[in-house]
Image (tube, helix red, strand yellow):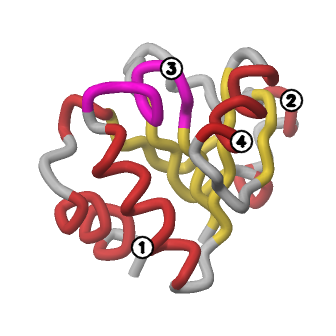
Amino acid sequence: MRIAFDVKGTLEGPKKNILLSAFVKLQEMGHECVVWSNSYGYAVDAVRDNNLDAEPMSKTMKMDLDHDETKFFDVAIDDDSSQTWLAAKRFIWVHEIETTGWLLNKILGESK
């Protein structure tokens, strides 16, 4: 599964520890996790500052990929629920997240 984590308000926000824990656990399970942001520099800084083994990237829009869902991320985690134009099949909004376990269940439980 491919999962995109936003930076500002998400990895750098009040639920940072929950998100970083889930990020690492998902990678340990073999899932591809990337750090993306509207500003590529924020993504690079977040990868470095949190010592993540991940690709930093700029956010991708659905139209950038010709609306081809096979190229979308399976899940995007973001704090801005207006960004439904992002290239993801599903979204998890930061304000919904309760615990690391809740987040992992939401990501993995709904992927079946």
Q: Circle 3 — which element?
A: loop
Residue at (51%, 20%) from the top-left corner? 8
Report which residue position mark 2 lands on: 64
As measured in the structure, the alpha-carbon distance from the residue carrying label 1 to the one carrying label 3 is 26 Å
Q: Is residue 87 left or right of residue 10?
A: right
As measured in the structure, the alpha-carbon distance from the residue carrying label 4 to the one carrying label 1 is 29 Å
Q: Circle 2 — which element?
A: helix
Label 4, residues with CA under 10 Å away: few <14, some 14-19, many ≥20: few
Closer mark to the observer between disc 2 and disc 4: 4
**Does any portion of residue 62 appear in the rendered image?**
no
Magenta stretch, main secondary structure, is: loop
At label 1, which amino acid type do we have?
A: Ser
Q: Is residue 66 left or right of residue 10?
A: right
Report which residue position mark 4 lands on: 48
Query: 5 or 74, which lies in front?
Result: 5
**Does any portion of residue 61 appear in the rendered image?**
yes
Location of residue 41 with respect to 54 vertically, above or below: above
